[in-house]
């Protein structure tokens, strides 16, 4: 049975564990919603948990809502360079940053117009690094209550944390801030490298039963 999920910016570890263990379908026909992981992710820096946010062009007035697939990036300032520099500063001393650096760097040098294209590219790169098949199926229409599959679109909601207690792994700044769970998959990748996929495979997914 397929799990219905949202594409998001370098998905968090819980979402990537679902992608690894279940057949998934991407929700691409919904309206864009603020304060979700569609355009943001969390990483660990020397200051603790830090959020990277992709700026978008908001639609106002009578239009109001806009479909996720129609959301354009706000490229008037170089946010891609800013995000890449932040990742370099946060993870350059991690065991595997240099190993994956060349795979990730092009994402921050390529021009993108739409948020959805950028997020899909981020997921594609991570799947390649993990040697994990990229889910290919996408929705063709929006269903408030899906007729088929299990609805886990709520995983993209940044304001509603899930009950998830993953085992700790070594993080760059855990001596200062302790273990920070369920960050972007990048945190796991940079710290665990080739062992990241095994970590995902062994994670308890009890939060799916909630």
Image (cartoon, rainbow, N blue to C red):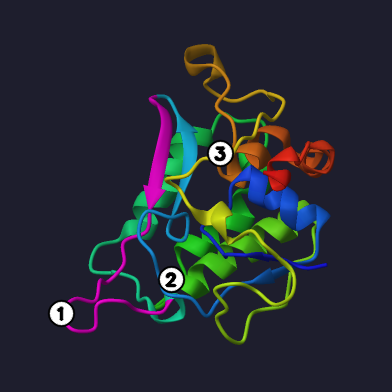
Q: Which residue corresponds to mark 2?
A: 115
Instruction: Say which residue appears at 72% left-offset and 25% top-offset.
Output: 167
Asked if residue 56 can be seen in this view, the reply is yes
Q: CA distance from mark 1 to mark 3?
A: 35 Å
Depth check: give the residue in front, 108 or 163: 163
Around disc 2, counting alpha carbons within 10 Å, would you say few (fewer than 14), some (14 to 19), or many (20 or more)?
many
Question: Which residue sits at x=54%, y=73%?
Answer: 144
Foreground: disc 1 or disc 3: 1
Residue 87: x percent and y percent?
47, 43
How far apart marks 2 and 3 lie (CA) works out to: 20 Å
State whether residue 155 is above or below residue 62: above
- Judge from the rendering whether residue 75 lies leftward or rightward of residue 106; answer left or right: left
What residue does disc 3 label? 183
Sequence-wise first label, 2 or 1? 1
Magenta part of the protein: which range?
47-67
Determine if the magenta segment contains residue 58.
Answer: yes
| Residue wearing tag 1 | 61
Q: Nearer the viewer, residue 14 or 116?
A: 14
> In terms of secondary structure, where does tag 3 sit?
loop
In terms of secondary structure, what is the magenta stretch mainly? loop
Which quadrant holds the N terminus? bottom right
Q: Quadrant of residue 103?
A: bottom right
């Amino acid at each position: 049975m397929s799990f219905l999920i949202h594409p998001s910016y370098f998905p968090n570890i819980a979402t990537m564990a679902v992608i690894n263990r279940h057949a998934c379908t991407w929700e691409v026909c919904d309206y864009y919603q603020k304060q979700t992981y569609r355009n943001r992710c969390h990483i660990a820096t020397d200051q603790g948990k830090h959020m990277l946010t992709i700026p978008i062009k908001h639609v106002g007035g009578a239009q109001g809502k806009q479909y996720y697939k129609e959301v354009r990036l706000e490229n008037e300032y170089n946010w891609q360079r800013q995000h890449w520099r932040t990742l370099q500063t946060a993870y350059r001393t991690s065991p595997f940053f240099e190993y994956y650096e060349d795979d990730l760097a092009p994402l921050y040098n390529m021009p993108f117009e739409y948020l959805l294209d950028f997020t899909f590219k981020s997921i594609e790169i991570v799947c390649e690094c993990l040697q994990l098949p990229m889910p290919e199926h996408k929705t063709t229409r929006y269903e408030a209550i899906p007729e088929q599959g299990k609805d886990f679109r709520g995983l993209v909601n940044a304001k509603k944390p899930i009950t998830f207690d993953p085992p700790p792994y070594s993080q760059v700044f855990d001596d200062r801030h302790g273990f920070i769970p369920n960050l972007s998959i990048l945190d796991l990748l940079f710290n665990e490298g080739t062992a990241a996929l095994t970590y995902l495979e062994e994670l308890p997914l009890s939060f799916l039963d909630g």
